[in-house]
Image: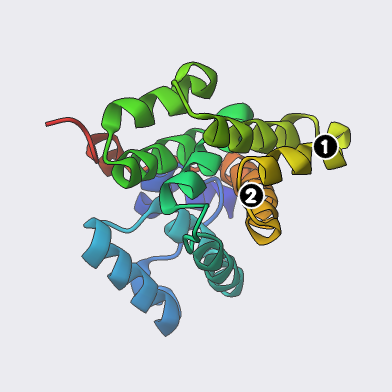
């Protein structure tokens, strides 16, 4: 089974060690998701193709993802992509770092700052609010047993509501899950991400 997956064109394009279904073979709701991605991005992200091996779980994961990426008053779409990048950098997740690096550059409208955050958020010249968000996301990723009530307080002191602080924690947790599954499948980022939201 794994040998067959490695020899298929779809698996080769995504890097996956697991079988990757052809788009024609996925359930109708996922065909809609793939079509929407192609309409918005111009391509289908490999995360969708690889996760389609377990279609019901892809649908559940994507619904969760979409809810967590709804911007709020003090936690913007760019902030949410920044969390994805910080967690992915800490974990060394190639797929998520490339994909969300592109998302961060786009949401910021500043490819230079987006790139700096992706490589080293501490030296990116972030304000105190963004610094607090990044520090929390990284600590929850690398040393979760050391997270205390004081760490939550840093988010509240930075101006986030309790609900937004929860979102920071949940986004960090979700991207740790996503990173690990991406790495467990050997998922490769779509080449298209590398050209997106660059200075031109």
The vertical placement of 23 against 158, above or below, is: below
User: Horizontally, is 195 left or right of 156 in the view?
Assistant: left
**Residue 46 seen by the camera:** yes
Which of the two residues, 14 or 32, is positioned nearer the viewer here?
32
Q: Among all residues in the image, which is located at the extreme top?
A: 123
- Check contact, mark 2 vs mark 1: CB within 8 A: no
Q: Is residue 138 left or right of residue 103?
A: right
Give the position of the C terminus as an image quadrant: top left
Query: Can you tell which mark lies on residue 177?
Result: none
Q: Can you identify the residue that label 1 sits on?
A: 150
Residue found at x 44% / y 21%: 124
Q: From the viewer's perspective, is the residue at label 2 or at label 1 nearer?
A: 1
- Choose the circle earlier in sequence order: 2 or 1: 1
Residue 24 in picture, x, y percent from top left: 34, 74
Residue 27 appears at what percent x and percent y?
45, 80
Residue 86 in view, yes or no: no
Front-most of residues 78 and 185? 78
Q: Would residue 104 be found to the left or right of residue 95 on screen?
A: left
Residue at 60% from the left image edge and 72% from the top image edge: 60
Residue 168's tag is 2
Q: Label 1's element? A: helix
In the current view of this chain or complex, which residue is farthest to the left? 200
Looking at the picture, how far across and down is residue 78, in whole percent? Answer: 42, 46
Q: Which quadrant does the N terminus fall into? A: bottom right
């Amino acid at each position: 089974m794994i040998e067959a997956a490695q020899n298929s064109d779809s698996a080769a394009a995504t890097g996956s060690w697991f079988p990757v279904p052809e788009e024609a073979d996925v359930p109708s709701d996922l065909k809609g998701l793939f079509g929407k991605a192609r309409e918005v991005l111009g391509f289908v992200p490999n995360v969708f193709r690889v996760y389609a091996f377990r279609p019901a779980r892809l649908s559940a994961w994507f619904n969760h993802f979409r809810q967590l990426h709804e911007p709020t008053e003090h936690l913007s779409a760019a902030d949410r992509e920044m969390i994805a990048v910080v967690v992915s950098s800490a974990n060394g997740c190639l797929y998520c770092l490339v994909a969300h690096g592109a998302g961060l550059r786009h949401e910021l409208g500043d490819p230079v700052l987006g790139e700096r955050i992706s490589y080293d958020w501490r030296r990116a010249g972030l304000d105190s609010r963004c610094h607090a968000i990044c520090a929390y996301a990284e600590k929850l990723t690398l040393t979760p047993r050391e997270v205390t009530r004081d760490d939550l307080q840093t988010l509240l002191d930075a101006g986030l509501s309790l609900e937004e602080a929860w979102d920071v924690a949940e986004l960090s947790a979700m991207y740790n899950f996503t990173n690990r599954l991406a790495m467990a499948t050997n998922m490769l980022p779509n080449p298209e991400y590398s050209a997106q939201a660059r200075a031109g």
